[in-house]
């Protein structure tokens, strides 16, 4: 039973005096109401401070996935696409296009031009390499096509060293790298392991024209070597690795020894990595500034190199087009099952536009340009507007080759979200750095490790099944999924069925390996399509921010 009014000493002390006059009462009530107003104001102020404190804590986002899965392209897509409104929303969507990044992006644009030129020149040199070998073989044995010697064999999935360019370890500019000295490989896509032409086909009839084209395009070898030396390790792909595990960071969870490895490597691959793509471009900018400061007198300045490169390439325009349009060359590539047009950084169809002195790079060119990420690159961005206005995001773009992955673990702590990219068009391709491993299988293994990682238990996982455009093109050409993925069986060989099938597999991996129950967020993407990617990223950002604030509430 509660105590009566008279028995409660606190209530009795706060009660108005028994002999209170009406005037005293009015004065007391005014004072009480003023005290309440001040107290409410203080509460509101504290609430506001707590809210802005929550917003002040940066949102940490990691982009993960194997090499060439599209991590950097996703970021580039963010930086290039203008503000859009998602369907059914009156709110302008922010985009990650904030003040800081915009400025940096504008500065970087001109440097990307050199990457596009390098990609284009490499496309041609790759064709010339094959042409050279085929012509030599045809000369040696004119009557029949030769069986491919080991030197001639075009290895499956991008494993051909070229003889054209300087080795990065001989370049003073390429000092740190995560692998043994990265050797070069062609980035062309080879659909099958077979490299020799079918023996029952008539031999290809190479003419003087082919010999002349090879001679006239020879200066492009030097151009490739110069550009690669300037850009450093990021400019060359890897085709070897010492790492046999899909997720070497797994071991970092087990004990101090492995953590030590991760720690040591983190220093080597710090966000200030001197070989990342941002840094590769920065070299161009810095050297350009230096040559400006020297009043243009610096010997062989960057501007000189850029102009020279552009001149040589422009001078080769007609011959480059002639090679790419040549019926015999196309037949040679088809017989070897080489699909250079599906490879990263393919620009030969744009040769008329790009091989000119006045070439102006477009946003689309930048998204499609290929420059490998070495180490980990950090972007700090603050939103200009939209629901994330004022909040800081830290985005980490990592190198995806197997040997780069060991450092990922160092970035998992306190991570709000991961966008995991799995390129689904690669169901019949092998890893560049380890050609025994199927690329889809590698993505499954990597996803499994990310899902099961205890440190990431509170992290939102968002899966992008990427390169759907290339999957569509591949299936249209008649590639059969079940030939590479037997469990696909007799399902319909179309994009919708394939995407559903792959998606289900990733979902099951999450369900059976995650240490806690968590939602499965998945998007089918072609991240080079900036318009639709902007809409996808808008939805992803909202969801990440909601989770971020919820986590901050729990703290
Ligand atoms: N057609 C097509 N090309 C894509 C897509 N996503 C990425 N690419 C291209 O694939 C190449 C590789 O993409 P990147 O973004 O450099 O790959 P990454 O995951 O950052 O690779 P690393 O830096 O080596 O880890 C680039 O030339 C991209 O333009 C896609 O959805 N469709
Ligand atoms: Mg990258």
Image: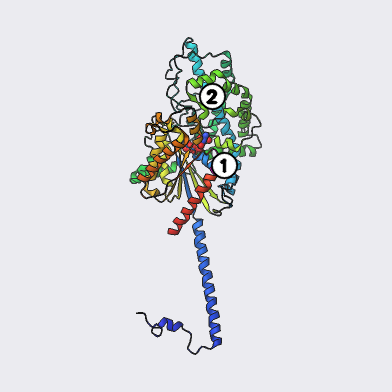
Q: Quadrant of residue 295?
A: top right
Q: Is residue 449 left or right of residue 338?
A: left
Whether residues under marks 2 and 1 lie with C-beta atoms below 8 angstroms apart, the answer is no
Q: Position of residue 11 (x, y in %)?
A: 43, 81
On screen, residue 328 versus residue 244, left or right, reads right
Looking at the picture, how far across and down is residue 297, in whole percent? Answer: 65, 34
Q: Disc 2 designates what residue? A: 125
The span from disc 2 to disc 1 (Cα, nearest Å) is 33 Å
Q: Nearer the viewer, residue 381 or 447?
A: 447
Decide: is 546 above or below 136: below
Q: How many marks?
A: 2
The numbered mark, 2 or 1, whose residue comes first in the sequence reads 2
* Res. 210 image quadrant: top right
169 left or right, relative to 303: left
Residue furthest to the bottom in view is: 19
Residue 407 is covered by the magenta coloring: no
Q: Position of residue 395 (x, y in %)?
A: 50, 46
Q: Secondary structure at mark 1?
A: helix
Residue range corresponding to the magenta coloring: 528-534
State the residue in front, 376 or 530: 530
Vertical position of residue 423 compared to residue 456: above or below: above
Q: Comparing marks 2 and 1, which lies closer to the viewer? A: 1
Secondary structure character of the magenta stretch overall: helix
Q: Is residue 524 in sight in this rendering?
A: yes
Quadrant (top left, top right, bottom left, bottom right) of the N terminus: bottom left
Helix or strand or loop: what does disc 2 sit on?
Answer: helix
Spot occupied by residue 26 in the image (x, y as percentages of width and height): 55, 83
Q: Nearer the viewer, residue 459 or 379?
A: 459
Q: Please name the colour scheme applied to the rendered image.
A: rainbow
Q: Which mark is residue 531?
A: 1
């Amino acid at each position: 039973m509660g105590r009566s009014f008279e028995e409660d000493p606190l209530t009795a002390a706060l009660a108005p005096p028994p002999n209170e006059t009406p005037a005293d009462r009015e004065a007391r009530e005014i004072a009480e109401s003023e005290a309440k107003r001040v107290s409410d104001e203080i509460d509101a102020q504290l609430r506001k401070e707590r809210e802005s404190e929550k917003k002040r804590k940066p949102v940490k986002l990691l982009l993960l996935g194997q090499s060439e899965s599209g991590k950097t392209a996703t970021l580039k897509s963010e930086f290039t696409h203008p503000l859009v409104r998602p369907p059914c929303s009156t709110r302008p969507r922010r985009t990650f296009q904030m003040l800081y990044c915009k400025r940096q992006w504008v500065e970087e644009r001109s440097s990307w031009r050199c990457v596009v030129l390098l990609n284009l020149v490499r496309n041609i040199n790759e064709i010339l390499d094959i042409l050279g070998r085929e012509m030599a073989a045809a000369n040696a044995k004119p009557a029949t096509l030769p069986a491919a010697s080991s030197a001639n064999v075009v290895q499956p999935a991008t494993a051909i060293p070229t003889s054209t360019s300087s080795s990065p370890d001989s370049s003073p500019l390429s000092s740190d790298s995560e692998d043994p000295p990265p050797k070069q490989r062609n980035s062309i896509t080879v659909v099958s392991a077979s490299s020799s032409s079918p023996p029952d086909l008539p031999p290809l009839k190479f003419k003087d024209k082919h010999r002349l084209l090879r001679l006239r395009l020879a200066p492009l070898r030097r151009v490739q070597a110069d550009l690669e030396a300037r850009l450093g390790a990021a400019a060359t792909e890897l085709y070897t690795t010492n790492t046999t595990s899909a997720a070497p960071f797994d071991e970092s969870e087990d004990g101090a020894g492995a953590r030590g490895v991760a720690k040591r490597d983190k220093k080597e691959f710090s966000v200030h990595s001197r070989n990342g793509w941002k840094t590769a471009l920065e070299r161009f900018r810095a050297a350009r500034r230096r040559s400006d400061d020297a009043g243009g007198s610096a010997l062989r300045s960057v501007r000189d190199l850029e102009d020279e490169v552009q001149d040589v390439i422009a001078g080769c325009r007609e011959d480059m087009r002639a090679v790419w349009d040549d019926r015999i060359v196309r037949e040679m590539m088809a017989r070897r099952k080489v699909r250079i047009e599906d490879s990263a950084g393919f620009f030969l169809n744009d040769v008329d536009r790009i091989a000119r002195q006045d070439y102006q790079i477009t946003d689309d060119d930048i998204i499609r340009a290929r420059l490998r990420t070495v180490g980990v690159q950090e972007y700090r961005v603050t939103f200009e507007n939209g629901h994330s206005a004022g909040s800081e995001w830290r985005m980490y773009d990592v190198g995806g080759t197997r040997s780069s992955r060991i450092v990922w673990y160092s970035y998992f702590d306190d991570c709000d979200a991961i966008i995991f990219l799995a390129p689904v068009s690669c169901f019949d391709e092998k890893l560049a750095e380890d050609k025994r491993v199927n690329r889809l299988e590698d993505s499954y293994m990597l996803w499994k490790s990310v899902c099961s990682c205890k440190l990431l238990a509170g992290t939102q996982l968002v899966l992008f099944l990427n390169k759907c455009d290339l999957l569509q093109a591949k299936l249209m050409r008649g590639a059969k999924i079940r030939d590479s993925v037997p469990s696909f069986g007799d399902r319909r060989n179309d994009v919708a069925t394939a995407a559903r099938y792959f998606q289900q597999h990733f979902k099951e991996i999450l369900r059976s390996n995650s240490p806690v129950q968590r939602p499965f967020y998945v998007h089918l993407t072609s991240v080079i399509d900036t318009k639709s990617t902007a809409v996808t990223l808008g939805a992803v950002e909202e969801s990440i921010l909601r989770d971020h604030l919820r986590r901050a509430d729990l703290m």
